Image: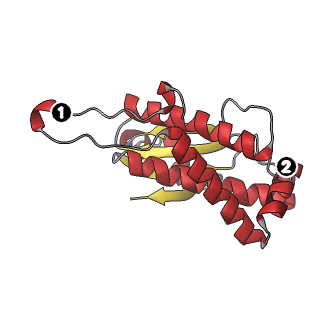
Amino acid sequence: MGSRSDQAVVAVDVESGLSPLHLPDAESVARAAVAAALEYGMQKTGSRREDALLWLRQGDGRMCGYFRYGLAKQVSEALGALDESIKAVYLLAYDATPEDTALCTASLSAPLHMIIWAERRTGALDAAVSALDGAVARQVAALAQLPLLRRLLDVQVVDDASVEQRIGYGALLTSVRYPPLRLWSR
């Protein structure tokens, strides 16, 4: 089990008499996300688990690309389930070169650039993203036998005002040149 910072913390209104809601810790969510991402890569490549793991560890572009997409999709779904203020989650590929795109190369240790569109940015959302980031990085490093990764998720949170006024990362949601890929939405 992870440290206290890796676990979801839930506040309970004692006066309401409601029983506490138990949420999975970040390590459990990350473990499930990485397993589902590997399964997605296996399905897309038609490979067995042993081959998929070998290809990931060798940096095979196709397998890594499918794995990274599957991982981003799983992470976005998990975050959406944890925070009802999230409207949508997007994946950006703005640091991919034309060669990366043409050759399907994607490093497992490169950050996943994501944008979360939420009603508002909160400390709870930031904490959930941070805990999940560390847990996902550890799980991916262990799976792919990489040196310990500190971070894997580069998440930017934008609110309604940023999107409506096209400010900062909010402007990217309607970008013609670098349109993000919607991974999840309500």
Q: Where's the C terminus, which quadrant?
A: bottom left
Q: Residue at x 54, y 58 (%)?
A: 183
Answer with left or right where residue 5 lies relative to residue 23: right
Give SS at disc 2: helix
Q: Amino acid at mark 1?
A: Asp
- Whole-percent x, y for residue 76 in the image: 51, 51
Q: Residue at x 40, y 51 (%)?
A: 81
Answer with left or right where residue 37 lies relative to residue 29: right
Count the marks: 2
Q: In the rendered image, is residue 113 in sight?
A: yes
Question: Mark 2 highlights which residue?
Answer: 57
Q: Amino acid at mark 2?
A: Arg
Residue at far top of view:
4
Answer with left or right where residue 75 lies relative to residue 142: left
Question: Mark 1 highlights which residue?
Answer: 13
Q: Is residue 119 above or below residue 55?
A: above
- Whether residues under marks 1 and 2 lie with C-beta atoms below 8 angstroms apart, the answer is no
Q: Residue at x 42, y 35 (%)?
A: 8
Q: Residue at x 48, y 38 (%)?
A: 157
Asked whether 60 or 47 is in front, the reply is: 47
Q: In the rendered image, is residue 87 in sight?
A: no
